[in-house]
Image (cartoon, rainbow, N blue to C red):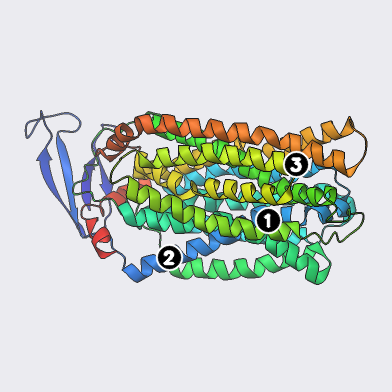
């Protein structure tokens, strides 16, 4: 047991460390031994480090990557079968966009709760609860009858709540297992599974629909994969002390702590707005792009109109494969470019994000404009746009981890997710469908007018992604200052659970050496 100054100033508090730590009383600067008042002594914790073998850390990372894959498959499995679900429940374009909006709104409302729990309680338990919630609800949604379409909307919201636990907490676990360049590489691999999972969501939905003729079976296959994920999580993934991967030679629990709001940096604010632009565009594209490509093929005479179930559209499958391929290449290129370039320029990460988003805006605009003229050119620019968007996933996560103190990372992840989804993909699918439906209502009822309405509703995405590039340019201006501030000892809000963890962090540099 070690004695630490009570933050209330009324005495001392006991922190159990399992007998592994010892305390040496060291005077604070400006204080003399024996001085009265709060904080006369700054305890120094000297303990055996928390450590994990290289193989165990890699196994944990692999499990989290697998769960991330399933997580994003759940995000976009509906989009892969959207035409059939619309026909089954008799849902219009404007209401179909609400499926994704309900999902994301429930995710963002619950993300701060899971972020708070992840900063103060067992992260492993929170992850397990989330998997159980989204897999059980997904299975139940496959048995909803057509007259209860509102229940299907509700089930998507509950799946979003379960998804929030993983999206919020998993990156912080990886941040506490790896450090520096290794963390960049691991996050790159982890975030590869955002576009890969999104693409496989389209592929699974489309493939199961074609094999069975019934979209419901896609929601019955997923729980089997998620049961395996839950078992692997329980067996192989540890719950490391917060900040375990950072080398902290000395931890003084009695130092004054700043509030959480004071720890939020401008780099975090601007990068969060940049992420919001990315989620806005990926949300709209991910939900409506397969239908847009289907209607483009109908306009070019390459595909008959969909008048009854199943629609037998290959566009979800094609778009899914393109998303997987561009996602893998884009995340690897972005992470590797950031790793190499920041050796020359410490502001490399936000600059890479800014350049890729500005180029993606141009590619997306050309893909939309050329779709009516030449479908091949539209596909080429769409692929380039997706590739450039994918370059950002791992890089923005590394920016957050570098400018936020370890004990605030779970809450910071939750805040970034919340803001990103509130202003991003919570409304973009619905807004796109609403604009398309409004334009279509004022035009003659034809497939050409339906295609043009959806095309015009997409054009705002190019403008939004250009704004995101500007936000990352502003991030670059403050990055170095905020990174130095986050590395200063004694910053960040403290909590009861971290009192034990902090006593184990005095020599955790061995993690980086072992890994």
Within 10 Å of the Cα at label 1, are there few (<14), some (14-19), or many (20+) other Cα atoms? many
Q: Is residue 350 left or right of residue 360?
A: left
**What's the distance in space between the residues labelled 2 and 3, CA to CA?**
35 Å
Whole-percent x, y for residue 31 in the image? 10, 30
Q: Quadrant of the C terminus?
A: bottom left
Q: How many marks?
A: 3
In-front residue for pair 54/203: 203
Residue 43: image tag: none
Note whether 433 is above or below 202 in the view shown. above
Disc 1 + disc 2, Cβ < 8 Å: no
Whole-percent x, y for residue 428 in the image? 68, 37
Question: Which one is in front in this view, the residue at disc 1 or the one at disc 2?
Answer: 1
- Which residue appears at 68% of the width and 56% of the height? 319
Q: Which residue is mark 3?
A: 98
Within 10 Å of the Cα at label 3, are there few (<14), some (14-19), or many (20+) other Cα atoms? many
- Which residue appears at 42% of the width and 69% of the height? 59
Residue 60: image tag: 2
Note whether 446 is above or below 9 in the view shown. below
* Residue 361 figure quarter: top right
Whole-percent x, y for residue 399 in the image? 40, 42
Note whether 511 is above or below 359 in the view shown. below
Q: Secondary structure at mark 3?
A: helix
Whole-percent x, y for residue 26 in the image? 10, 41
* Residue 67 figure quarter: bottom right
Dot 2 or dot 3: first in sequence order is: 2
- Which residue appears at 26% of the width and 65% of the height? 514
In-front residue for pair 333/265: 333
In-front residue for pair 478/174: 478
Is there any visible trace of residue 157 in the rendered image?
A: no
Residue 319: image tag: 1
């Amino acid at each position: 047991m070690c004695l630490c100054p009570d933050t209330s100033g009324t005495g001392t508090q006991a922190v159990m460390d399992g007998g592994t730590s010892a305390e040496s009383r060291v005077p604070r600067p400006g204080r003399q031994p024996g001085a009265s008042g709060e904080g006369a002594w700054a305890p120094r914790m000297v303990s055996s480090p928390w450590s994990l073998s290289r193989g165990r850390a890699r196994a944990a990372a692999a499990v989290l990557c697998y769960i991330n894959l399933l997580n994003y498959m759940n995000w976009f499995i509906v989009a892969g079968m959207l035409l059939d679900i619309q026909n089954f429940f008799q849902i219009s374009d404007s209401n179909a966009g609400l499926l994704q909006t309900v999902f994301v709104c429930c995710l963002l409302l619950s993300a701060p709760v899971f972020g708070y729990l992840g900063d103060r309680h067992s992260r492993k338990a929170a992850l397990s609860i989330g998997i159980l919630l989204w897999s059980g609800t997904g299975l139940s949604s496959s048995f909803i009858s057509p007259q209860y379409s509102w229940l299907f909307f509700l089930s998507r919201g509950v799946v979003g709540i379960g998804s929030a636990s993983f999206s919020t907490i998993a990156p912080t676990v990886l941040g506490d297992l790896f450090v520096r360049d290794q963390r960049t590489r691991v996050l790159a691999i982890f975030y590869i599974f955002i576009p890969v999972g999104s693409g496989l969501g389209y592929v699974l939905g489309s493939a199961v629909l074609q094999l069975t003729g019934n979209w419901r079976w896609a929601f019955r296959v997923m729980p089997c994969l998620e049961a395996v994920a839950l078992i692997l999580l329980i067996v192989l993934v540890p719950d490391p002390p917060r900040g375990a991967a950072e080398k902290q030679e000395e931890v003084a629990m009695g130092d004054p702590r700043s509030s959480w709001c004071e720890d939020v940096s401008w780099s975090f604010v601007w990068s969060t707005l940049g992420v919001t632009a990315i989620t806005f565009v990926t949300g709209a594209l991910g939900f409506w792009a397969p239908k847009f490509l289907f209607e483009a093929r109908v306009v070019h005479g390459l595909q008959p109109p969909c008048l009854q179930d199943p629609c037998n559209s290959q566009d979800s499958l094609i778009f899914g494969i393109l998303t997987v391929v561009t996602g893998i290449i884009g995340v690897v290129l972005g992470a590797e470019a950031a790793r190499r370039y920041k050796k020359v320029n410490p502001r490399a990460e936000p600059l890479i994000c800014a350049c890729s988003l500005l180029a993606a805006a141009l590619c997306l605009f050309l893909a939309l404009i050329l779709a009516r003229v030449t479908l091949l050119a539209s596909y080429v620019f769409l692929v380039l746009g997706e590739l450039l968007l994918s370059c950002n996933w791992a890089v923005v996560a590394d920016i957050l981890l570098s400018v936020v103190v370890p004990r605030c990372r779970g809450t910071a992840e939750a805040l970034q997710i919340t803001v990103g989804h509130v202003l991003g993909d919570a409304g973009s699918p619905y807004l796109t469908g609403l604009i398309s439906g409004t334009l279509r209502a004022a035009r003659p009822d034809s497939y050409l007018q339906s295609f043009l309405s959806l095309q015009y509703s997409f054009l705002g995405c190019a403008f939004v992604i250009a704004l995101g590039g500007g936000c990352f340019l502003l991030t670059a201006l403050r990055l170095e200052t905020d990174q130095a501030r986050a590395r200063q000892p004694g910053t960040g809000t403290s909590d009861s659970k971290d009192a034990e963890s902090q006593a184990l962090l005095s020599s955790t540099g061995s993690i980086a050496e072992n890994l």
